[in-house]
Amino acid sequence: MSSTSELSKNIKRRQHQLRELEDPCLSEGRASLDCFQEQAESSETFKFCEPFFTNYHICKTFWSNIKERRQKDGLKPYLPEEKDREHIRSQFFQDFMKTQSK
């Protein structure tokens, strides 16, 4: 029989997996928040955390574009399954970044 703490850990792990399915930028968002919390007292919080914020913004914009493209093309699910994301990222990310730098 599992202990309450093991059950709690399993529940948290499952909740994380479900959030990851819904948000492909979960780790980037967490990194931004962690940086912000760690630097909250600093007068240079934004300067220090800007790379994290930028990375999160790029991630959200990229996957939003992928969802829109898939919806337009009639592909479901609109947000690709987690197992397909790395392939899609490697296939489209370089072209996406070229359009962002213009």
Image (cartoon, rainbow, N blue to C red):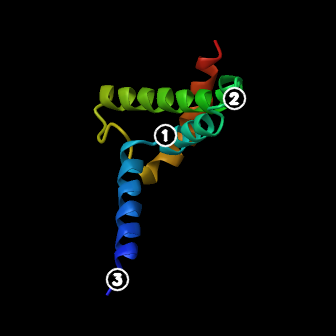
Residue sitting at 35 percent across and 53 percent down? 18
The crowd level at tag 2 (other Cα within 10 Å; few <14, some 14-19, many 20+) is few
Callout 1 amino acid: Cys
Q: Relative to residue 64, is residue 12 depicted above or below?
A: below
Question: Does the residue at mark 1 contact the one at mark 2 (Cβ under 8 Å)?
Answer: no
Q: Distance between the residues labelled 1 and 2?
A: 26 Å
- Give percent across and percent down for residue 42: 69, 29
Q: Which residue is drawn at 34% across and 73% down?
A: 7
Q: Quadrant of the N terminus?
A: bottom left
The C terminus lies in which quarter of the figure? top right
**What numbered label is drawn on residue 25?**
1
Type of amino acid under label 2: Ser
Q: Mark 2 points at which residue?
A: 42
Most extreme residue toward the bottom is 1
First in sequence: mark 3 vs mark 1: 3
- Looking at the picture, tell me which residue is in the foreground, 28 or 94: 28
Q: Is mark 3 on a helix, strand or loop?
A: loop
Q: How crowded is mark 3: few (under 14 residues within 10 Å), some or many (20 or more)?
A: few
Determine which quarter of the picture holds residue 48: top right
Q: Is residue 11 above or below residue 60?
A: below
